[in-house]
Amino acid sequence: MAAETSHCTALLNEAQQSTGASDAASWDGQILILASDEMRAGCISSGLGDQPHQIEITGHPDWQTRRLRLMGASAIILASPAADLELLAGLLAMRRFRSVPVLVFVDQGSREDMSRALKLGVSAFIVDGLEPERIAAILDVAEERHALTLALREQLQKSQEDLAARKTIERAKGLLMTKSGLPEQEVYDSMRRMAMTQGKTMREIAENVLAIFAIFP
């Protein structure tokens, strides 16, 4: 263990020199390594190889004042003895962090910790598996999973929006049919022509119809 610690610390020193880590460093487009200590940071840095990354040691006294520099990351890898769910919640609450994969490496963790972390939006939760040779592969899988999750979320949101639009159009169409006495197809065609003429969507036209009827029932 001592030899591994020494090796990882040496790797960390090399990584910091090569990336020129400083208070003015930019995280944009880079992988963030948020580690509780130098040993864990060095192991992850070694595993990432040539992939651009930078390092923050969350155990350092000035960490709280530096954490706001982390806004442009392409991915986040957090390594600590145990799951820091408070830190995770804080990071994932930042809007831009919701759109990047987050990986967590811990020495010990319960199923409950894993479940809570995944619900927060973590892409990978690895217990007792912080080995440099595994980092790249785990990151690849996490990125694929994150992309799939985003795609499914966007698909669900679009389906919900489409359903809401259809309901709004149906309500407006029903009111127009009742008030005008015209058949459904004629009312629908009139709404569609109005949408094309005004350069609006059918939902916008329907919302306008409902708003008018709300004022003049």
Image (cartoon, rainbow, N blue to C red):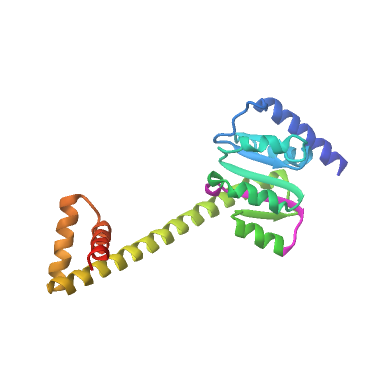
Q: Quadrant of residue 23?
A: top right
**Image quadrant in which you'd find residue 183:** bottom left
Extreme right residue here?
Answer: 2
Give x and y (percent) for residue 14.
Answer: 73, 28
Q: Can you say whether 130 is above or below 158 in the image? A: above
Residue 209 percent location from the top left of the image: 23, 62
Does 32 sit left or right of 197 as displayed? right
For residue 121, above or below residue 28 = below
User: In this orientation, which residue lies closer to the viewer: 162 or 64?
Assistant: 64
Q: Is residue 164 above or below residue 44?
A: below
Rendered image quadrant of residue 29: top right
| 113 relative position to 122: left or right | right
Q: Is residue 127 magenta?
A: no
User: 63 left or right of 146?
Assistant: right
Q: Residue at x 34, y 62 (%)?
A: 162
Asked whether 80 or 13 is in front, the reply is 80
In the rendered image, the quadrant that contains the N terminus is top right
The stretch in magenta equals 98-111
What x and y, as percent, mark residue 63?
72, 37
In magenta segment, residue 100: yes
In the image, what residue occupies the spot 57% across and 38% down? 71
Q: Nearer the viewer, residue 172 or 215?
A: 215
x, y (%) of residue 28? Answer: 55, 34
Report the label total.
0
Residue that extends furthest to the front in the rendered view of this protein: 216
Residue shown at 66% from the left, 38% from the top: 67
Indicate the quadrant containing the C terminus: top left, top right, bottom left or bottom right: bottom left
